[in-house]
Amino acid sequence: MTDTATSDPLVIAGTVVGSRLIMGTGGMTSPESLTGALVASGTALATVAVRRVDPSTRHSLVDLLEGLGIRILPNTAGCYTATDAVLTARLAREAFATNWVKLEVIGDDRTLLPDPIELVLAAEQLVDDGFVVLPYCGDDPVVARRLEQVGCAAVMPLGSPIGSGLGIRNPHNIELIVEQAGVPVVLDAGIGTASDACLAMELGCSAVLVATAVTRAGDPSLMAAAMRDGVAAGRAARLAGRITRRFVAEASSSFEGMVGQ
Amino acid sequence: MTHTGQRDVVVVGGGIIGLAIAWRAVSAGLSVTVVDPDPGRGSTWAAAGMLAPVAEAQFGEESLAALNLAAVRAWPGFAAALEAAAGQPVHFRADGTLLVAGDPSDRAATDRVLAFHQAIGLAAERLGARACRESEPLLAPGISGGVDLPDDHQVDNRSTVGALLAACETGGVLFVSDEVTRVDIRDDRATGVELSDGTRVDAGAVVVAAGSRSGALGGLPEAVRPPVRPVRGVTVRLQAGPGIPRLRRTVRALVHGRTCYLVPRHDGGLVLGATMEERGFDLSIPLGGLADLFEDARRVVPALDEYSVVETTSGLRPGSPDNGPIVGLTEVVGLVMATGHYRNGMLLAPLTADEVVGLLGSGSGSSDPSPSPFEAFRPDRFSPVVTGWLGTDS
């Protein structure tokens, strides 16, 4: 754990999460490569698809995450309606013994973009039901604000479509979301490589979620370490405060008073 | 009560791995009993019979790719010997595989894997869309190209099961239609197995070839329990009627980032697969997975619309922590592992059978001085964190 992780922790719903890098587990090629990647990432929170992983069997992914001391964040991947998502979240609460849920309601098969209307509906119901809701949403600042207004504990806008690796297509929208948000903003979906994760943090996001970019990398452990470093660098740069952009040069040292002047 | 007195070997599980071991073992002069409630009807029955060392080679799995390549080269001899012993065909076909990219993004993905395959010396040749369609005229006009994989072959898995059962019967393998409840181990030595009806099979060696259930077998000390988990796969059996066009050879496809394969049989049958689902020991067949398979396959081969759906089959692959098989001796004398073959059970069956029979004969390793192709796939290779996850009752 770095000094920054202890002095500048990510806090969601009053709970300290030990790392600003959240890992998705979808797309793993083998348990061994996933284990290596999770360890290298330094993550403290990982998502598990409720509909794709059976937590009751002895050999499930859940045992691996618990063995590594990584908190489980069930997600509602594969749901297309608010009703589906709410049912799946309740199932997850029973099965995984947690009231945290990453809420996903997909609106389009091809792009896997979220359905904002069903998402807000589901979020309202789940918040009422006592869940800590972390919704995966588009990069629309108005939708992000509505999700916060109905009581979500964080908002998780996409950088670009799930698994696309296209990075952050509309950085300005992410900045708008960050600027207005009273809850942590987690950049979710679209990360392709470490510089994307770094940029998300420089834009002011509180954390980054990556899955495919790591699990499908040529060397998942090495990419996980790169993501960890990218997130750390971006966070530090954000806290440090960047210089303003100028159209022409500004000399880094003054010429006044130099010998021969 | 015991069955038939003392045997040299009892094989737990009569899938492709257990049957191949049993046949090779009786051929080597050993007395063999196979215990399985329904031999050949587990994941072996659901399989498509692809023998795909190249298409299955993933980043970071170079040693598994080398094993798989050796395995495909053992198939022609194995198939010929089995057909001679059984007097029936297995329909082994060495005509390669065509990998097709559905759209330009899929093409970029297949190019990335192609570069990896070529870098580690696997046979793979990039083809344009036109060349793909000349090779396989039923492909949709909109595909974005593909890769010729001349070392990836196929065999009819069900014909192979039939031939192995016949060859085993002829060779004198005894079949006990029951489930093993526990492996008997006395003084660190395997002495046989107990069955669910309370009877026993006494044997000098016990081979665990129970697929995804190998890790749940009773009586195994934790230190030797194989870390396998079930990974569900659903396949669909289709049939081309008279006059319906047929694929020439095996086609694999990447469509919008999802994979599927179409394996044509000599009789107009076609196996479409497969889903990959981590849902425990549940054999049900959700509609969503089937719908994806149908959608992706139709996009690549539109003529499939005219095929009849004959059967949907669900099986449980024995997945291991690193996707490689778990084959070799254990610290318990006479207890041999032959499991964890995951997506490559058909492919690895001949090599696994030879390896296990070699180990049974020598007691400590193959008498052949050349190194075993399974050196990197021994049962004791896993790190504690991974086996702790997969192999214990925590």
Image (cartoon, coloured by chain):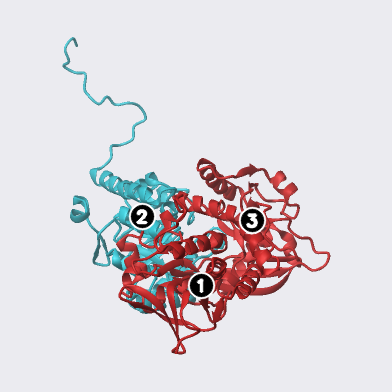
Chain colours: A cyan, B red
Q: Which residue is mark 3?
A: B76
At numbered mark 2, what does the secondary structure look like: helix, strand or loop?
A: helix
Residue B321: tell me if it is visible: yes
Q: Nearer the viewer, residue B337 or A182?
A: B337
Q: Which residue is mark 1?
A: A81
Chain at numbered mark 1:
A
Q: Earlier in the sequence, mark 2 or mark 1?
A: 2
Q: Quadrant of the C terminus of chain A?
A: top left
Picture coordinates of residue A86, whole percent (x, y): 43, 76
Q: Tell me what residue is drawn at x 21 percent, y 18 percent.
A: A255
- Binning the other alpha carbons within 10 Å of mark 3 as few (below 14), some (14 to 19) or many (20 upward) gives some
Give me the C-alpha separation between circle 3 and circle 1.
52 Å
Q: Nearer the viewer, mark 2 or mark 3?
A: 3
> Are the numbered discs 2 and 3 placed on the same chain, yes or no?
no
Q: Which residue is mark 2?
A: A37
**Residue A97 in which image quadrant:** bottom left
